[in-house]
């Protein structure tokens, strides 16, 4: 994971623990004031929200226990790896620019693709000029040639 991704995850965890926990606790408190819990849909919804929140907190904490932050100064730009900024061309001649990230940091709409995505997998480890093949979710096979790699 990049240091930027780690910071984002830590910020989300902090928000969940401080802000959102209080909001859910308040929703539960308000729902309890409505009386009979057996027919109290507001209470059921608030408890469900609480369960989802606690599940997300647990998932992030587990992720943070096993995180490995990439040292960008040690990264090479000889081949594609997590953290690489790449410019690639498909077999139709269209060019794309991406940052290769771990699955937790992927944001395809903002140019960050996962190393586990079809395109990411196809170019991992390649050098400039080399070509990889990806099978896209629609079943199409596409060739990608690496044009440029940077940090």
Image (tube, rainbow, N blue to C red):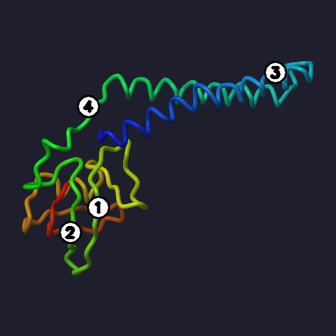
What secondary structure is marked by label 1?
A: strand
- Name the residue located 41 percent from the left edge and 54 percent from the top edge: 107
Tell me: 72 left or right of 30. left
Q: Which residue is mark 1?
A: 98
Measure the C-alpha gap from mark 3 to mark 1: 46 Å
Question: Quick one: label 3 or label 1, which is nearer the N terminus?
Answer: 3
Q: Which residue is mark 3?
A: 29
Q: Nearer the viewer, residue 126 or 132?
A: 126
* Residue 18 position in % (x across, y down): 61, 26
Question: Quick one: label 2 or label 4, which is nearer the N terminus?
Answer: 4
Residue contact between numbered discs 3 and 2, judged by CB atoms under 8 Å? no
Tell me: 113 left or right of 70. right
Measure the C-alpha gap from mark 4 to mark 3: 39 Å
Question: Quick one: label 3 or label 2, which is nearer the N terminus?
Answer: 3
Q: Which residue is mark 2?
A: 88
Residue contact between numbered discs 1 and 2, judged by CB atoms under 8 Å? yes
Q: Nearer the viewer, residue 33 or 20?
A: 20
- 7 versus 87 height, above or below: above
What secondary structure is marked by label 3?
A: helix
- Name the residue located 52 percent from the left edge and 26 percent from the top edge: 57
Q: Residues within 10 Å of mark 4 (few under 14, many from 20)?
A: few
* Residue 58 position in % (x across, y down): 49, 23
Quarter of the figure that contains the N terminus: top left
Q: Which residue is mark 4?
A: 68
Residue contact between numbered discs 4 and 3, judged by CB atoms under 8 Å? no
* Residue 4 position in % (x across, y down): 36, 43
Quarter of the figure that contains the C terminus: bottom left
Measure the C-alpha gap from mark 3 to mark 2: 54 Å
Q: Residues within 10 Å of mark 2 (few under 14, many from 20)?
A: many
């Amino acid at each position: 994971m990049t240091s930027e991704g780690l910071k984002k995850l830590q910020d989300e965890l902090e928000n969940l623990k401080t802000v959102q926990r209080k909001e859910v606790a308040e929703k539960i408190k308000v729902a309890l004031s409505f009386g009979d819990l057996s027919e109290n849909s507001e209470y059921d919804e608030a408890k469900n929200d609480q369960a989802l929140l606690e599940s997300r907190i647990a998932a992030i904490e587990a992720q943070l226990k096993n995180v490995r932050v990439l040292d960008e100064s040690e990264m090479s730009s000889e081949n594609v790896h997590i953290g690489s900024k790449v410019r690639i061309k498909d077999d139709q001649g269209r060019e794309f620019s991406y940052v290769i990230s771990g699955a937790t940091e992927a944001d395809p709409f903002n140019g960050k693709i996962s190393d586990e995505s079809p395109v990411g997998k196809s170019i991992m480890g390649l050098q400039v000029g080399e070509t990889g093949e990806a099978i896209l979710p629609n079943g199409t096979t596409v060739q990608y040639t690496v044009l440029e790699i940077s940090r």
